[in-house]
Amino acid sequence: PIQRRRLLVGGTALLAAPAIVRAQPSPSRNPFTLGVASGWPRPDRVVLWTRLALTPLEGGGMGEAPVDVAWEIAEDERFTRIAARGAFRATAAEAHSVHVEAGGLRPARPYWYRFHGGGQTSPVGRTRTLSADTARPERLRLGVASCAQYEQGWFSAYRHMASEPLDLVVHLGDYIYEMSWGQRHVRKHGTAVPTTLEEYRDRYALYKSDADLQAAHAACPWVVTWDDHEVENDYTNDRSPLTSDRNFFLRRRAAAYRAWYEHMPVPPSMAPNGPDMRIHDSWRFGDLVDLFLLDDRQYRSHHACAGGKGGRALFTDCAERLDPRRTMLGVEQETWLRDGLSRARGRWTVIAQQTLMAEADRAAASTAEHAYWMDGWDGYPAGRQRLLDAMAVRRDANHVVLGGDIHMYAVADIRSGNGPVIASEFVGTSITSVGPSAERVRTLAARNPHLKYLRGDKRGY
């Protein structure tokens, strides 16, 4: 039963669909505990997301029955000019998550959206469509975020991000952390390292229950890639640094990818197939920017210089590192990116990926030897060179690389060997994850003059 006043507050979408209203659980409890989000914007559509969860840290508490959810998107904050509406059946198989691709929208304008279900109305989110391909926008305001370890700090950076006039947030991975590490925790995960689908779902629910993260999601659309901590620290493709059981790890990867999909504002067409899920994509913002979002974790070659044991990433060097067959992105994604770069026509070409792309000798200050981080692009120099060659074909593209992962700010010139600068790189620091020591930052800067700016003592975006 639905109280008359609640039905009227819920709006015309519920009045138009009484069967949907009757399908809901009791209205005495709020199922929208994880907030709302939007993402994957295009000139004429955007993805809307929520997940129904009465008890978010205990599996969701929604039972096994499907729940019909009404959604609406409007041209004004009061929802007097509805642009589109519909219904979505949320099922237990997808943790009662909702992925709606709202179409028929106009380009380059804000929209407001909300959901109705369980006798309740969700918070209102604000989103924005892209400029038309033929438009000439003057600017694009991007927020870049990564590395939000729940235990190591409050998500105040997300709260500040929500107050910025951003067109889009680009999240570059480590949205959650599967592991507990570091000192001086301000709060705790409260559960062990996840390995099953149910455990990953609860870990995402813990992070998404944070009010500041919810505010950042509700403020503007997001596009999101992943890095390693969404599954397991320093994993490469189908190999875990913690177990030699490939089948066990792929089952874990499948669970992690499924939970990632269930909690991100991505299209329904992106749903994973077991341990496989394509997430790399591209966007065009009129004639201003072509944006490419990469996946450098799922398809990469295994770590070099590990003696074939699949161990953790090392700061070292060896001949294997230079093998021309080694790839960070995989052959298929490399081909897709090369073709996309050749077709880019924007005044700027932005490549958003997980980590520092510029070469970085990480050896101690006193040694003449070189040491490279095998889990970053330096572990895949041949793959990086193929990417730089593809970028160099179009000299007028104004290439910009965005990165995260290293828990510090960095600005770098990206060169091909001793040749001219091919791209400018901007790496954002972590939302909360602890950064490197001041001594390590000084050593890195001294050994790498092309790293123009490094700062590891600040958290943010």
Image (cartoon, grey):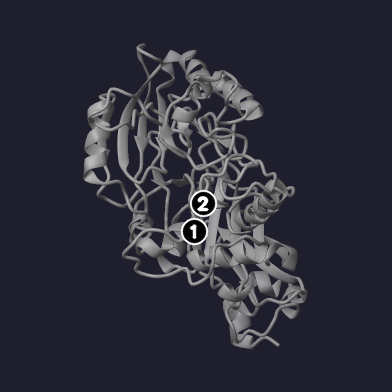
Type of the residue with mark 1: Met
From where the camera sits, is residue 180 visible? yes
Cα distance, mark 1 to mark 2? 8 Å
| Mark 1 and mark 2 residues within 8 Å of each other at the beta carbon | yes
Instruction: State whether residue 170 is above or below residue 73.
Output: above
Image side of residue 422 versus residue 267, left or right = left
Instruction: State whether residue 413 is above or below residue 405.
Output: above
Q: Which residue is mark 2?
A: 229
| Crowdedness near tag 2: few (<14), some (14–19) or many (≥20) residues, C-alpha within 10 Å | some
Q: Nearer the viewer, residue 351 or 242?
A: 242
Location of residue 253 in the rendering, given as x and y in whole percent from the top left corner:
65, 51
From where the camera sits, is residue 271 visible? no
Picture quarter with the N terminus? bottom right
Location of residue 195 in the rendering, given as x and y in whole percent from the top left corner:
62, 60
Image side of residue 200 versus residue 276, left or right = left
Q: Quadrant of residue 30?
A: bottom right
Q: Nearer the viewer, residue 198 or 78?
A: 198
Type of the residue with mark 2: His
Q: Which residue is mark 1?
A: 179
Q: Residue at x 47, y 34 (%)?
A: 374
User: Circle 1 — which element?
Assistant: loop
Q: Quadrant of residue 211?
A: bottom left
Location of residue 56 in the rendering, given as x and y in whole percent from the top left corner:
57, 73
Q: Earlier in the sequence, mark 1 or mark 2?
A: 1
Q: Residue at x 50, y 64 (%)?
A: 208
Q: Residue at x 46, y 53 (%)?
A: 220
User: Circle 2 — which element?
Assistant: loop
Q: Nearer the viewer, residue 306 or 393?
A: 306
